[in-house]
Image (cartoon, grey):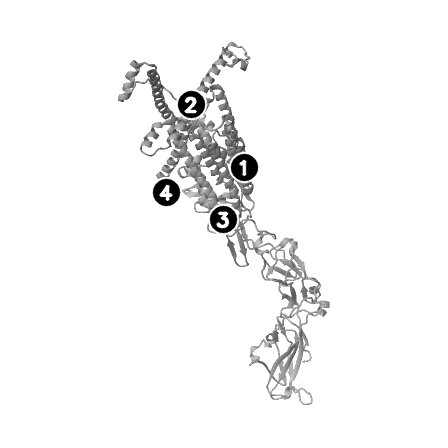
Amino acid sequence: SESTRESYLSGVNVTLDDISIWVYDNESHRLLSFDPLVRLFTLNLTYVLTPASVPEQTQQTVSLPQASIAAAALRSQNRSYIMNGTMGVYSRNGLAVASGLWIPYPPVGLYTLHVRHSGFAATAVFQFEVTVGLPTSLRFLVKPPTTSAPMNDLQQIPLTLQPVLLLQDIANNSLLSSALANDATFYQYFSIPLKASCVNITSTSCEWNSRSPNGGLFEFSGLVLVGNNDQIYRINFSLGNFPGLFVVSEPIRILPCTPLAQKYAVSATTQCINCPDNAICNGTSTLLVLPGYWRGSTTTLKIYACATLRACNPSGPREVTECAPGSSGPLCQVCLPGYSLKSKACAACPKDVTQNIALVCVIAVVILLVILLLVYSSLGSKRLDATSVVLKIAINYLQVATKISELLAARYMPSFITEFFASQKTVSQPDTQILSLDCILGSNFKFQQQFVMFMLAPAWMTFIVGLVLLPVITLSRRWEARKAAEVEHRKEFRARREAGIRAYGGIHMRQFEEGYPVDVPRQKYKHSKSQIMVASLVIVLFMIYPTLLQYCANMFKCQEIELAQGVVRSYLSVDMRIECSGGYQFYQTLSVVFALGYGLGIPLAAVVVVYIYMLMTGQIVAFKVFTFLLAGYRKERWFWEAVVMLRKMAMVFIIVFITDHKLQMYAAMWMLTIALVAHWWSQPYDWASIHNLEQLSLSVLTVTVNLLLLFEYRGSTASSTTSTTTTVSTKSGMPDWAYWFLCVVVFAINVAFVLLLVYWLIWAFKMKVMLRFEKVNILLKLLGLPLIRSDRLDSLVKADERAEEIEERTRQHERHQRKFLSRVKGRGKSLKLNPAALSPAASPAA
């Protein structure tokens, strides 16, 4: 048909114009009505695709998509024309009209329609062209990668594959002809660059434009996706405001930070930071906290050391810390009901309440017996009695050794060593953790109530001790006075017998020989109640002095804990149930008063009171009352116990206020070294053996703290991380054999010294018994079990008698001196005496 078009735009379908097929004769005349036959003509469609070529200016190697040949099948609106895949049309009066022919989604190319009839040798051919249609979609020739590098050290790394996109019509034909750009129909599509933007980021830093379009080809270069860690991104490519001309990339994931084991990807940010200490990293925002450390949530990077390794993550590394059974709260230091805090870890309370109460009572009785023993031995001791001196050295050692278990570095020691140090608190200083009052009083018994109870402890403990000791000491002193009177009477009897008073003395001698008792007048000799109460108060303050200081100092030790990102709370370190806010300031003010009163007041008061007492009553009486403070010291160093108390105060403040574990260890080591040097230089003790025992005590503590520094090398944990697995290794800079050898050394030297203290206490107790009860050793000697050898006993008895003689002379001298001073003050005169004139050699009369 002459009116049929020769060119069509591609689209959803190309509907051809009606095709008229005429029957001609040999002379090229149309037969029309001269052809009465109804003829069947078959139509077949062939085509030659126009290949799309990449413009020469394209910088990347791309492969263009090929059109689908199946899309060129010829269709007809009248399905009756279809016969075996071939289009058929019938003619009448020499004319056949093929109407409604269409081609779905035709590729661009040259199409040829072949018309055939079985009765004719010739074939009619009709050609037409299909050109690209209007752009309806974008297609990736080069897709963006599914991963993007992170921002390591603030370096922006472009995508490994820069995207290339192509405009296509609805039949997927590529619009690559440069001639199209000059066509008014297509100019609006080729005049603007392609815009790319992130789907879930509104920042302008996530928007790019392609280079100038090259035909229908859009290329990107230097495209950098700066995305947040652990986020999934898609890039939206769009061309202006044309609807449908957009395409979204596949999900793009930000790669982990490198190196994997050393970097941590901060969630919801573009930052890659170094892996936090005490954690395991794999380059992502997944962070595993090592055992012994605490992390509140996955949104915080703050990691805190737990009080003990077994309290946090006992089963292995976790993202959020898992507390041991019975523990909860910050740093796993809040005990659940049915658990009590012991040695900085929550331990189960006895299931039987009666058993728990009995345990508390037993421990309280043990503490009370220790105090009673100290008070009793102090009141009844003599110059040669070393019991109270050795007890004092033992308690001083135990109180400082107990603090070693509270050092931060002690968390790396095995549990049996920390338990060994912590168990010494039972006999060295009272504490609520020893008594397990939480198991009885419940969770409402918080640190404020414990603080008030211990601040009042000197009063009620002194009252209890004095109440128990008053009758005991009174009865004991009466019995001793009776025995002393008997001895004096025997001495008087021997003197009278030697003087020749036979009548009086013979009767009594026969009574002694026949075993009859001698009538001896009773003498009442006992310590006054005030002396007993003063001695009890001194012992109680000595025992609980470190505890008092620690409770006062702990009131100021608050720790800020980041529970989650932006959520920070300040908790009391010793009781994480208490927040350091609100009414807590009242207790802090109260602790300042008690800290000054007890911390500096007790040593200062001890020095002042003893000095005034010595001036008023003399050294002998002062020694009897303050035996526990003065026993064993030289006269020039009678104040040394106050120095020892200040040493304990320094140790407590180092533990409470220094939070850096290495600095804490160095401070404790320096303090003990200074104490050791000061003790060696001053030599405060009267006896060389006691001096050496105290020096050995300080040496053991100093060596223990020095060795404790080496446990820091055991605290490091190595980890190796791959893209798929994370391996944790407990190996560190210290080999296992070295670690356990160090543990054995620390444990051995402390156990050996404790055994040495036990030996010294037994020796001092034997000496005390021998000085008081000579007949006991005589009886045991007859049984072949003497407590002490006869020669040593004789020397001790003679030394004791000499000491008593010296004490008596000193007492008489002090008594005469006080009388003399009172007379002088009574006369109101000021005497100036020449000491040489008062000497017997210068003036016999004097």
The reply to whether the C-beta atoms of the residues labelled 3 and 2 are less than 8 Å apart is: no
Label 3: which residue? 739
* Sequence order check, earlier mark of 4 and 1: 4
Work out how far the residue at label 3 is from the one at label 2, CA to CA, in angstroms: 55 Å
Q: Residue 351 carries which label?
A: 4
* Residue 202 in view: no
* Sequence order check, earlier mark of 1 and 3: 1
Q: Residue 279 carries which label?
A: none
Work out how far the residue at label 1 is from the one at label 3, CA to CA, in angstroms: 24 Å
Say which residue appears at 65% left-offset and 66% top-offset: 166
260 in relation to 625, above or below: below
* Sequence order check, earlier mark of 4 and 2: 4
Coordinates of residue 377 in the picture (x, y in percent): 41, 28
28 in relation to 170, above or below: below
Work out how far the residue at label 4 is from the one at label 2, CA to CA, in angstroms: 56 Å
Coordinates of residue 307 in the picture (x, y in percent): 49, 43
* Residue 55 in view: yes
Hey, which quadrant is residue 240 in on the image? bottom right
SS of the residue under disc 2: helix
Q: Residue 673 carries which label?
A: 1
> Which residue occupies the extreme left position in the image?
514
Label 1 CA crowd tier, 10 Å (few <14, some 14–19, many 20+): some
User: Between residues 316 and 56, which one lies in front from this camera angle?
Assistant: 316
Q: Residue 804 carries which label?
A: 2
SS of the residue under disc 3: helix
* Sequence order check, earlier mark of 3 and 2: 3
Coordinates of residue 809 in the picture (x, y in percent): 45, 19
203 in relation to 138, above or below: above
